[in-house]
Image (spheres, grey):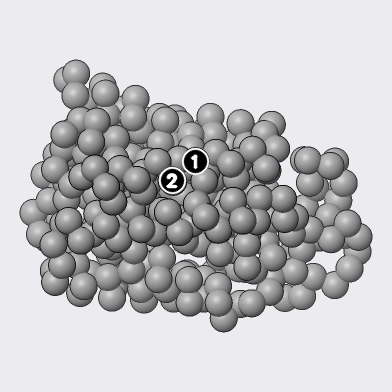
């Protein structure tokens, strides 16, 4: 029971960070379970994917999620993400766990570098009345208190990244937000909070093929730990959405980059 309690507390932390950054929490939960609690990497990834689905459902139904998420963009990105997740299942059986750890670490390091490179970039137009196109939107920017607008640019790039995110989701047990959020924010013109909420909405379906794959492979064998992690992540997600409206976007980017860099170093050099 002590292990279940520790996993639940880990889920609270991972859920808070995942909700704030739109990453689903998996990228934080996997190293906590694997490194901190010495749970085998495949079992940690399987538990993580279960929590990703729970987080996605919470975001989709919460008032904060509905406020920030771009539903039209989420539906467009969901198709290539699901295709990528199914492709990832085929690749999963062909590579060793250590290689998946290296993919995990390398992806985290790349994303951290991109976020720092565009730390002060803002993806909003101060005139909210402008044409935002078919997938753009208008929001009230908490950082400035103004009504702002944004346009979605480089959509083919976003679709390609969503497909890659689906592959990563199945391979390393995360929801794919590790790729989708930075891509939408840094290259597709979507504000950070909108990118995070939109990513969180699509993560559940993206993670589902991975859960099935890990279950069939015999890695989803700790139902009590999975349940504890889900409860923790749901509680943490609620706290994360409360925090995200009270923290500057720049601070969120710095937090995201720092955590990802630490995870990358651990999996690339110390595992």
Residue assigned mark 2: 261
Question: Who's the residue at 54% across and 34% down the image?
Answer: 240
Secondary structure under the numbered disc 1 in the rendered image: helix
Q: What is the x, y in percent for residue 132?
A: 79, 70
Numbered tag placed on residue 258 in the rendering? 1
* Residue 266 can be seen in this image: yes
Question: In the displayed structure, would residue 251 be above or below residue 173?
Answer: above
Numbered tag placed on residue 40 in the rendering? none
Say whether residue 257 is left or right of residue 164.
Answer: right
Question: In the displayed structure, would residue 56 be above or below residue 15?
Answer: below
Secondary structure under the numbered disc 2 in the rendered image: helix
- The answer to whether marks 1 and 2 mark residues whose Cβ atoms lie closer than 8 Å is yes
Name the quadrant containing residue 194. bottom right
* Residue 234 can be seen in this image: no
Name the quadrant of the N terminus: top left
Q: What is the x, y in percent for residue 42?
A: 16, 50
* Label 2 Cα neighbours within 10 Å, binned few <14 / some 14-19 / many ≥20: some
Question: Who's the residue at 35% across and 33% down the image?
Answer: 11
* Label 1 Cα neighbours within 10 Å, binned few <14 / some 14-19 / many ≥20: some
Question: Who's the residue at 8% across and 54% down the image?
Answer: 218
């Amino acid at each position: 029971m002590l292990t279940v309690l520790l996993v639940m507390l880990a889920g609270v932390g991972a859920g808070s960070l995942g909700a704030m950054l739109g990453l689903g929490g998996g990228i934080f939960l996997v190293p906590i379970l694997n490194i901190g609690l010495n749970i085998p990497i495949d079992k940690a990834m399987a538990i993580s994917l279960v929590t990703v689905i729970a987080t996605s459902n919470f975001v989709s139904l919460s008032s904060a999620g509905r406020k920030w998420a771009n539903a039209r963009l989420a539906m467009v990105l969901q198709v290539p993400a699901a295709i990528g997740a199914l492709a990832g299942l085929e690749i999963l059986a062909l590579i060793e766990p250590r290689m998946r750890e290296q993919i995990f670490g390398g992806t985290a390091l790349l994303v951290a570098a991109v976020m720092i490179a565009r730390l002060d970039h803002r993806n909003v137009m101060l005139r909210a009345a402008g044409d935002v196109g078919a997938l753009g939107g208008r929001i009230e920017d908490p950082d400035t208190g103004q009504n702002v607008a944004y346009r979605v640019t480089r959509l083919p790039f976003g679709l390609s990244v969503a497909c890659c995110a689906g592959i990563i989701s199945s391979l390393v047990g995360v929801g794919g937000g590790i790729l989708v959020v930075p891509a939408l924010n840094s290259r597709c013109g979507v504000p950070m909070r909108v990118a995070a909420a939109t990513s969180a909405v699509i993560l559940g379906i993206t993670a589902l093929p991975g859960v099935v794959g890990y279950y069939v492979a015999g890695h989803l064998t700790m139902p009590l730990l999975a349940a504890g992690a889900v409860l923790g992540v749901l509680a943490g997600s609620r706290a994360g959405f409360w925090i995200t409206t009270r923290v500057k976007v720049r601070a969120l980017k710095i937090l995201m980059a720092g955590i990802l860099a630490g995870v990358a170093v651990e999996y690339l050099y110390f595992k």
